[in-house]
Image (spheres, rainbow, N blue to C red):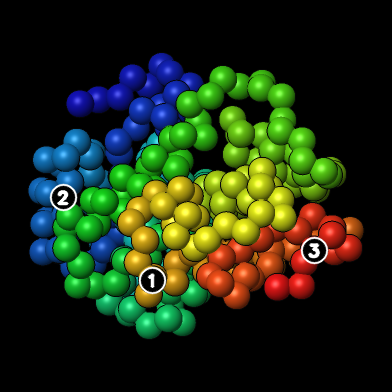
Amino acid sequence: MQENHNHDLSDHYIHSREILIVEDDVALCQMMTSFLAKHGWIVHVVHTGQQALETFRRSCLAMILLDIGLPDYSGFDLMREMHRFVDTPVIVISAHGEETDRIVGLELGADDYLAKPFSLRELLARMEAVARRSVSRSRLEFRLPPIVIDTFLIYTETREVFYGTTKLALSATEFQLLRFLLQRPYEVCSRELLVRTVLLRAYEPLDRSLDMHILRLRRKLKGLSKFRGGIRTVRSGGYMLALHPEKSIDI
């Protein structure tokens, strides 16, 4: 079904079900394409990094499924290049499930990381969760006033957060996570609450994706020259955002 290209970019993004699979395993691509098409996704497939660069620049995609083990291009380098032009959500799919690879992928802005082999139903569930996070921030009317919390300004409709006049470079997941914490300063939020409410999936104690997103947020907050607060780790298994160091609690 063709999208109506007369709509503006934001309208197309909200309604788009087009995705790009960047994967050199042809058989796996065929399986994913057939399965996802049955669930309403419009699937484009490329097998090299160069083809991916040529495709995503001329397409309005809802999501990119990116294999980091491409024959001609480092998937991590490709993700860096993509994020220079678009903020399309990315799910990394890889044969490398080591923690280091997961950390690198999430630090580069991936919204999720799925290690091979994976079930197609799990892939679909992860995709739908990422899509809900991305679409929820685009459905509101434009020109809404920002949410003001201390020195932070949250523009929900454009998924932007400013500290004073400094704009933070955030992925869709990082934005949702920071907004959630900013609206509950000094409140301890459990890992389970954050996974279910922000990542929009079932809580699994061994899944470290949330921690990687927190790590990236901490680094970005530390990069703000005048911000002295931060995200504290709570020993009982959660996180708390302190806006000012003098008000933080020793936890």
Which residue type does callout 1 highlight? Pro
Residue receiving disc 3: 248
Residue 195: % across, % down: 44, 57
Disc 3 residue type? Ser
10 lies above or below 57: above
Q: Earlier in the sequence, mark 1 or mark 3?
A: 1
Q: Residues within 10 Å of mark 2 (few under 14, many from 20)?
A: some
Relative to residue 65, is residue 77 depicted above or below?
Answer: below
Q: How far is mark 3 from mark 2, CA to CA? A: 49 Å
- Foreground mark, 3 or 2, reads 3
**Cα separation between marks 1 and 3:** 26 Å
Image location (x, y in percent) of residue 208: 44, 71
Residue 205 visible to the viewer:
yes
| SS label for mark 3 | loop
* 2 vs 1, front mark: 1
Classed neighbour count for the residue bearing mark 1: other residues with Cα under 10 Å, few (<14), some (14–19), many (≥20) = few
Q: Nearer the viewer, residue 94 or 139?
A: 139
- Looking at the rendered structure, the secondary structure element under dot 1 is loop
- The residue beneath circle 2 is 33
Report the disc number at residue 205. 1
**Residue depicted at x 35% and y 53%:** 201
Q: CA distance from mark 2 to mark 1?
A: 31 Å
Quarter of the C terminus within the rendering: bottom right
Report the amino acid beneath label 2: Thr
Q: Is residue 220 left or right of residue 116?
A: right
Rendered position, 196 above or below 49: above
